[in-house]
Amino acid sequence: MEQYLTFASHNLMLFAALAVILAMLFFNLFGHRLRGYQVVGPADAVNLINHKDAVVLDVREINEFQEGHIVNAIHIPQSALSKRINELEKHKSKPIIIGCRSGHRSGQACAMLRKQGFEQVYNLQGGVMAWRSANLPLTRK
């Protein structure tokens, strides 16, 4: 144990870098739980839609949405979500799966919905790109 303390005291920058990397890894793996929402893959999202009557919210911009979206998805762009969040009030008791292109914007939207009191919020891991990669259907209607 004494050798570890000696090593750490002689290599403070290396030890600090290790601490930062470990903190970032922890936040990457468990950050969504700390913020109060869960991450689901495409297969689990399909299960929620089919068995729990989950609502899909697409937060991509209109041009991305028109290129193809999950069937029956509600479209509210991330930039307009704070102004239009009242449109989701009727779905507050249902699970809400939020998706974007790759999963980054939807994480921000998940945090926003949790702050507004939505209990069952899920972030679609990998977004529509992962949905498409899983060969799941998209529509342009």
Image (tube, grey):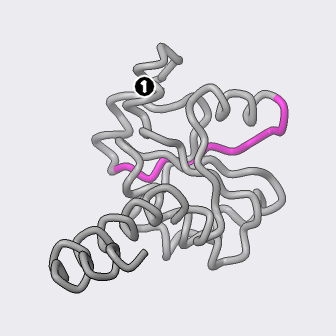
**In this figure, which residue is indicated by the disc labeled 1?**
140
Q: Quadrant of residue 90?
A: bottom right
Residues packed near mark 1 inside 10 Å, few (<14), some (14 to 19) or many (20 plus): few
Picture layout, residue 30 above or below residue 133: below
In the image: residue 33, left or right of residue 53: left
Q: Which residue corresponds to the image point at 42% horizontal and 22% vertical from the top-left?
A: 132
Looking at the rendering, the stretch of residues picked out in magenta corresponds to 51-60
User: How far from the left and from the top, in percent, is residue 75?
Assistant: 50, 49
Secondary element at image label 1: loop
User: How far from the left and from the top, in percent, is residue 69?
Assistant: 46, 32
Which quarter of the rendering shows the N terminus? bottom left
The answer to if 57 sits in the magenta stretch is: yes
Q: Quadrant of residue 118?
A: bottom right
Q: Nearer the viewer, residue 30 or 2?
A: 2
User: How far from the left and from the top, in percent, is residue 135?
Assistant: 47, 13
Q: Which residue corresponds to the image point at 38% horizontal and 65% vertical from the top-left?
A: 22
In the image: residue 15, left or right of residue 37: left
Residue lying at the far bottom in this picture: please name it: 9
